[in-house]
């Protein structure tokens, strides 16, 4: 199974979702979602569809799409080679649809932003507000000058209040509170000079940030240790050889490997993997459902 597909399937299962539920939320056909999770990109119409579906599906699963798209682009040549091989083995079918050219212009339904299961059209309230503003302008002009010509009073304040209430009902926002001027005579100590004391000053302390421990400048070899704290899909490559790939459950391990040149770690749940390099605890290198892609290189590696 393709590693990108494994990450997507792991994230979906971690949310307790089926492919049918994912299809209903993302509006992406179930067979295309299954093709993404199985790494069968040749079954998607075009490269644009592949990247669009991959980006939107990753966002729906709360994954950062950038490293996934970068890894797809890195391995794209191998995917294209596989597609050409499969296309060469296919027999001509008169009933099959015509192939789509890469330069063909088409409507791309996948470039939509997904936030949870709700899609909103943000323009509607603003269009209503603009229309109301135009109506308000006409109403203010009419009510400003007509009463003057007929000898009546100015009703601008009442009109403004009614329009503010209408806009608040449409946008589901409460109207701003009316400012009340307090009676200075009723306030104890009013008019007296104000003195500042240290007890009345609230200091705004900076938020502490977590920093990763620094590894030594010289690493003759790399001893990689993994402790699994949550379920996570993990792939470990030691000196260009994959030594572990698959699901790891909480409590598994600890796993240890020694690399003479490079050690690579790829995981679909950075919060579920506690990393130690040469007895230096780096800890969890990311958040829950965050893609972790790290490489450590020994000093003498050429």
Image (cartoon, rainbow, N blue to C red):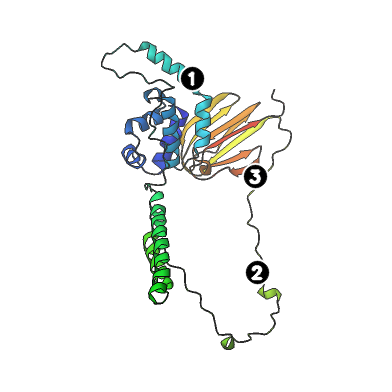
- Which residue is disc 3 drawn over? 212
- Which residue is disc 1 drawn over? 78
Q: Secondary structure at mark 3?
A: loop
What is the spatial separation of the Cα atoms under label 1 and label 2, in whole angstroms? Answer: 60 Å
Answer yes or no: is residue 267 visible: no
What is the spatial separation of the Cα atoms under label 3 and label 1, in whole angstroms? Answer: 35 Å
Q: Nearer the viewer, residue 291 or 127?
A: 127
Answer yes or no: is residue 300 visible: yes
Residue 116 pos. (x, y %): 40, 47
Residue 22 pos. (x, y %): 35, 40
At a point 47% along the width and 29% down the height, the residue shown is 3
Q: Nearer the viewer, residue 216 or 9?
A: 9
Mark 1 or mark 2: name the one nearer the start of the chain.
1
At a point 49% along the width and 30% down the height, the residue shown is 245
Mark 2 or mark 3: name the one nearer the start of the chain.
2
Residue lying farthest right? 217
- Which residue is disc 2 drawn over? 202
Instruction: Indicate left or right for 135 with 233 as reference.
Output: left
Instruction: Indicate left or right for 209 with 168 as reference.
Output: right
Q: Secondary structure at mark 2?
A: loop
Residue 297 pos. (x, y %): 66, 30
Mark 3 or mark 1: name the one nearer the start of the chain.
1
Quadrant location of the C terminus in the rendered image: top right
Q: Is residue 85 above or below residue 200?
A: above
Q: Is residue 132 above or below residue 117?
A: below
Disc 3 or disc 1, which is closer to the eye?
A: 1
Residue 8 pos. (x, y %): 43, 35
């Amino acid at each position: 199974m393709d590693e990108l597909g494994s990450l997507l399937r792991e994230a979906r299962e971690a949310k307790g979702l089926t492919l049918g539920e994912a299809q209903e939320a993302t509006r992406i056909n179930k067979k295309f979602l299954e093709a993404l999770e199985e790494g069968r990109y040749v079954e998607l119409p075009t490269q644009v569809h592949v990247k669009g579906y991959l980006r939107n599906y990753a966002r729906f699963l709360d994954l950062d799409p950038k490293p996934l798209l970068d890894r797809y682009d890195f391995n794209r040549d191998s995917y294209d080679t596989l597609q050409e091989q499969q296309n060469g083995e296919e027999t001509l079918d008169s009933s099959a649809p015509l192939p789509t050219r890469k330069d063909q212009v088409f409507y791309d339904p996948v470039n939509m932003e997904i936030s949870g299961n709700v899609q909103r059209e943000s323009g509607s309230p603003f269009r209503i507000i603009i229309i109301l503003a135009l109506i308000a302008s006409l109403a203010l002009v009419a009510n400003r000058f007509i009463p003057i010509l007929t000898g009546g009073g100015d009703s601008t304040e009442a009109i403004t209040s009614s329009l503010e209430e209408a806009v608040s009902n449409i946008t589901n926002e409460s109207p701003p509170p009316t400012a009340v001027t307090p009676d200075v005579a009723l306030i104890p100590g009013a008019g007296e000079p104000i003195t500042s004391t240290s007890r009345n000053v609230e200091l705004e302390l900076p938020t502490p940030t977590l920093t990763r421990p620094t590894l030594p400048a010289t690493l003759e070899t790399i001893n990689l240790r993994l402790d699994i704290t949550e379920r996570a899909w993990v792939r470990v490559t030691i000196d260009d050889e994959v030594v572990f790939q698959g699901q790891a459950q909480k409590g598994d391990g600890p796993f240890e490997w020694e690399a003479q040149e490079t050690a690579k770690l790829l995981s679909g749940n950075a919060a579920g993997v506690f990393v130690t390099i040469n007895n230096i605890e780096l800890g969890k290198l990311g958040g829950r459902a965050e893609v972790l892609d790290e490489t450590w290189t020994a000093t003498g590696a050429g």
